[in-house]
Image: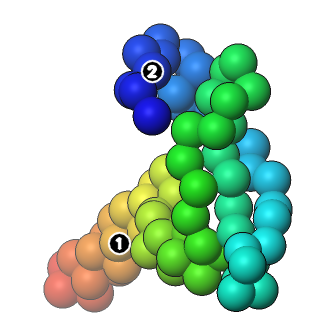
C-alpha cells in the first residue's frame, strides 16, 4: 500500500471505520481514505485501546480549567 497525501482539513476529520471479521473470528476495523480505498486495517482490540489512550481536546481544556479553579481556591485561603 502506498501512502496518500491528505490535506490538513481532511486529516483532522474523524476517520470512518467499517467493521469486518478475520478468518480467526476477531473483529477488525478498516479505515478508508477519501477515495474509499483501505488506508489501514487493525483489530478492534488495538484500535479501541488506542482510542482510550488518546485524550480529547475537550478533556484537556476541562482539566486545565479545574486546575486553575483549585489553585485560585488555595491562594484565596492563604490570603484569608
Front residue of 1/13: it is: 1
Question: Which labelled disc corresponds to residue 67?
Answer: 1
Circles 2 and 1: CB distance less than 8 Å? no
Q: In front: 69, or 59?
A: 59
Residue at image position (74%, 27%) is 36
How packed mark 2 is, by other alpha carbons closer than 10 Å (few <14, some 14-19, many 20 or more), is few
**As drawn, is 31 to the left or to the right of 46?**
right
Answer few, some or many: residues within 10 Å of disc 1's Cα (few below 14, many 20 plus, some between 14 and 19).
Answer: few
Residue 44 appears in the picture as rendered: yes
Along the line of sight, the residue nearer the viewer: 62 or 39? 39
Q: Nearer the viewer, mark 2 or mark 1?
A: 2
In the rendering, at what x and y percent does residue 44 appear?
65, 75
The residue to which callout 2 is attached is 4
Determine whether 75 is above or below 78 in the image. Answer: above
Residue shown at 74% from the left, 51% from the top? 17
Q: Position of residue 63 (x, y in %)?
A: 43, 68
Amino acid at each position: 500500500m502506498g501512502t496518500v497525501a491528505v490535506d490538513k482539513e481532511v486529516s483532522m476529520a474523524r476517520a470512518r471505520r467499517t467493521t469486518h471479521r478475520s478468518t480467526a473470528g476477531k473483529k477488525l476495523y478498516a479505515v478508508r481514505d477519501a477515495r474509499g480505498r483501505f488506508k489501514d486495517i487493525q483489530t478492534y482490540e488495538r484500535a479501541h485501546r488506542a482510542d482510550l489512550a488518546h485524550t480529547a481536546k475537550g478533556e484537556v481544556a476541562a482539566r486545565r480549567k479545574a486546575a486553575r479553579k483549585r489553585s485560585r481556591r488555595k491562594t484565596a485561603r492563604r490570603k484569608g
